[in-house]
Every structure is written in structure tokens, then in C-alpha cells.
Image (tube, grey):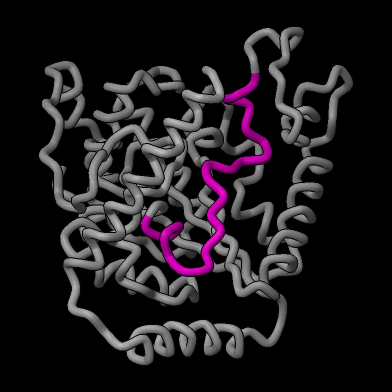
Amino acid sequence: MTSATNARTIAVEIEAALDMLQAYKASVPPLPVTDSFPSLLDQCEAMCRSFAGPEPIRTLHHFACSGGTLIAKCIAALPGVVLLNEIDPLSEIHLPANLRDPKFAPTDLFGALLLSRRPINPAVITAGFREATQTIVAGLAPRGQSLVIRDHAHSHFCTQIDPKNRQSLHEILAEGRHPLLSLVTMRHPLDSFLSLHANGWLHFSPPTLATYCQRYVEFLDRHADLEIVKYEDFVAAPERVLAQICHSLALPFHASALELFSIIRLSGDSGRKGRQIAERPRREVPADIDAQRGGQDYEQLCARLGYDA
């Protein structure tokens, strides 16, 4: 791609963002500056006063294709939020199949350790990640910025590795100096499984609905103490649920995030496109998957989560 092409692409994206901001400005009644900003500043100041100790690390946990990207985009669009997307220091899903053919990744310190010719104790990697994260949080706090880490739980719970054999992202960070504020988000397991199937992301074996549900239960058990937010509740009442999320994560709420989320670019954006937040119809259920819905693992998971099987 030439520099001219890059410049045109950037210009188009800037124009699209400006158009979106203009559309949002036209859609709301004008407010005096004194009515708009002090409220938000008061929220930020109150949040700062509420933390007597180290600034918290905020984390977001969910399975792939469960609506997590949409929610993460809305959080990333909140004032002062710095969101790190799809993070897992022990993930091997992105490593080349042939370890003798590593890819250029000059900023990926932990990936380089995983590719080392000499075995590296995972505790070295997790300790380094924890210290790096705490350094980042401490550096952001004086600028009024809040770190939110979106976990790539798929790497841990939905690949060929045994999830029991390693720490989760939440467990790694819980051993640090900073308090954790964390949420689990979820969607009906059939919908997320159908999307995984359609995207070719069934990285576990056997790639059945029952195995998926067993992995889901392991994930839930490892995050049992965390508050749960359902994707279906979010799309039904986005402003109310985003305010709930902000309260749980001690972030200042601003409804404009629901208008601006679509300009946020994140990896893992496999599903929803566009600016509207609304419920989407379920994908067509293939006959072979529909036949698995009577299994005990699936029915028990739906019951645990409060969904119809």
C-alpha cells in the first residue's frame, strides 16, 4: 500500500468520524457548557477520591462471539478509558505452527518468551505481565485515565490446552498490588456456539456443543465471584446497562459512548456492524447442532445462566 493510499484511507476514516460527531451533535438539544462538563468532572473527581490505595485494574471477561466486542467498544468510548483488547499473556493461539518460523513482532515481549528455544517457566511470564500492567496503571492514573483489560478467554478455555493447567488472566492479576474490578459478560450459549461454528473457531476437540458447555462451566467456575452482565440485557437497554457497568467498574458514565462506539476499532469484531445497538435474530441452527440441544451439559448450562434451552 502506498503512502498516498494510506493518506486517503486515513482521510476517509477522519471524515466518517466527523460526520458521526456532527450527526450526534444535531440529534441532541444544545446545552450550555456549564451544564455538560461539570457533571462528568464531578464523577471523575469522586472516583479519584474514592480510592485510598492504588488505582484499580479493571478487567472484562467473556467467551468469543458472545457480544463482548460491542460492550468493550462502548467501554472504550467512555471518557478517560484506555482499553487493551484481547489480552492473555499465556496465549499460544497466535504463535506460528512452525516455531522455527517466528513472525516479526517487536513489541511482543511475552510472545517472544513463549517462542524461546529454552523452556521458560510460565510464572516468569505471568510475573512480568503483572508488573508491566501495574506500571501502566500507575502511569495512567495521574492523567485521569483508567486501564481496562479485555481478556482473551478463548485462548485459555476454548483451545486444545487443558484449562485447568494454567492461571486465568484474572488469577494472574489478582496476585498483584492493585485491586481488581472485574465483570463477566455472556450471551446465550447456543448463539455464541453457532457464531463460533460459522467463523470456524471451534479450536477444541471434539468440537461439539457438549464440549463447549463443559468449557463454559470451567470458565464460570474460575470467575464465580464476578458480577455477570448479559448481552441480551445490554442490547435491550444499553444506557441503563452501560451505567450499571460503569458503576461496577468505577468508571464515569457518559451516554455519548453509545453514539461513539462504532468509531472504535478492535480486533475480534466478528459479528455486529454499524451504529445501531439492537437485538439480532438467532442464526439458523444446523440440524446436527440442533440434535445436540437435548444433551445434559447444554441443558444444565442454560439452567445455570437462566436461559431457555
Name the residue rendered at 44%, 18% in the picture. 205
Left or right of 99 on screen, residue 231: left
Residue at the right extreme, as displayed:
118
Q: Nearer the viewer, residue 41 or 243?
A: 41
The quadrant holding residue 107 is: top right
Please tell me whether residue 142 is drawn above or below residue 65 in the rendered image: below
Left or right of 136 on screen, residue 62: left
The quadrant holding residue 74 is: bottom left
Tell me the quadrant of the picture where the C terminus can be found: top left
Residue 260 part of the magenta segment: no
Q: Nearer the viewer, residue 4 or 167?
A: 4
Task: Give percent across and percent down for residue 69.
Answer: 38, 45
Q: How many marks?
A: 0
Residue at the front extreme, as displayed:
4
Q: Nearer the viewer, residue 24 or 44?
A: 24
Is residue 216 visible to the viewer in this orientation of the structure? Answer: no
Please tell me whether residue 213 is drawn above or below residue 204 in the rendered image: below
Task: Give percent across and percent down for residue 31.
Answer: 26, 84
Residue 85 part of the magenta segment: yes
Task: Give percent across and percent down for residue 298.
Answer: 26, 37
Is residue 302 visible to the viewer in this orientation of the structure? Answer: yes
The quadrant holding residue 180 is: bottom right
Give the magenta-colored segment's residue range.
74-95
Left or right of 36 on screen, residue 142: right
Name the residue rendered at 67%, 57% in the picture. 173
